[in-house]
Image (tube, helix red, strand yellow):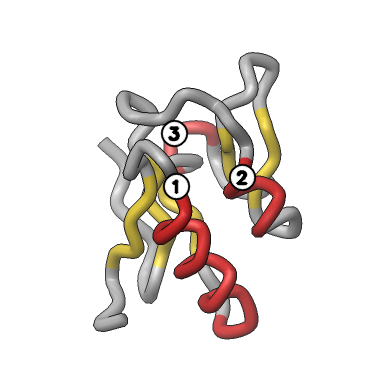
Amino acid sequence: MAEPPPGPALHIDWTRCDGRGLCTELLPELLARDKWGYPVAITGAPAARSDVTIGPRHLDAATDAVALCPLLALTIVGSHR
C-alpha cells in the first residue's frame, strides 16, 4: 500500500465510488476519469492515484467535492479541516 502524500490529500475510496464524476468536474486540474468513469489523479504513480495532493488553492473545491459526493467515497486526509 502506498504512503499518503504529505499535507492534505483527497482520498478516493473506489469501493464506494460509482463513477458519477462530480469530483472530476469540481477538480479538473487534479482529477480525470479513467475508461470506466472513476476518478484518478492526473499526476503521480498509478499505485498512489487514490490519494491526491491538494494545494491551498484547491482545498475549498476538494472540501465541496467531499460534501457533495453522493456515496461518501471521498475524504480529506492529513488536514485538520
Mark 1 in CB contact with mark 2 (< 8 angstroms): yes
Q: Secondary structure at mark 3?
A: helix
Tell me the amino acid under the disc marked 1: Cys
Q: Residue at x 67, y 32 (%)?
A: 33
The dot on residue 32 is none
Of 76 and 41, nearer the camera is 76
Q: Position of residue 28 (x, y in %)?
A: 74, 54
Q: Residue at x 70, y 40 (%)?
A: 32
Tell me the amino acid under the disc marked 3: Ala
Q: Quadrant for the N terminus, please.
A: top left
The dot on residue 69 is 1
Of 80 and 50, nearer the camera is 80
Q: Is 60 displayed left or right of 9 in the figure?
A: right
Q: Quadrant of residue 80?
A: bottom left
Q: Is 28 displayed left or right of 48 in the figure?
A: right
Which numbered mark, 2 or 3, is in the foreground of this view? Answer: 2
Q: Secondary structure at mark 2?
A: helix
The residue that label 2 is drawn on is 22
Q: Position of residue 67 (x, y in %)?
A: 41, 60
Of the two numbered discs 1 and 2 on the same chain, state the one appearing first in sequence.
2
Q: Residue at x 69, y 16 (%)?
A: 35
40 to 54, vertically: above or below: above
Tell me the amino acid under the disc marked 2: Leu
The residue that label 3 is drawn on is 47
79 to 3, vertically: above or below: below
Q: CA distance from mark 1 to mark 3?
A: 23 Å
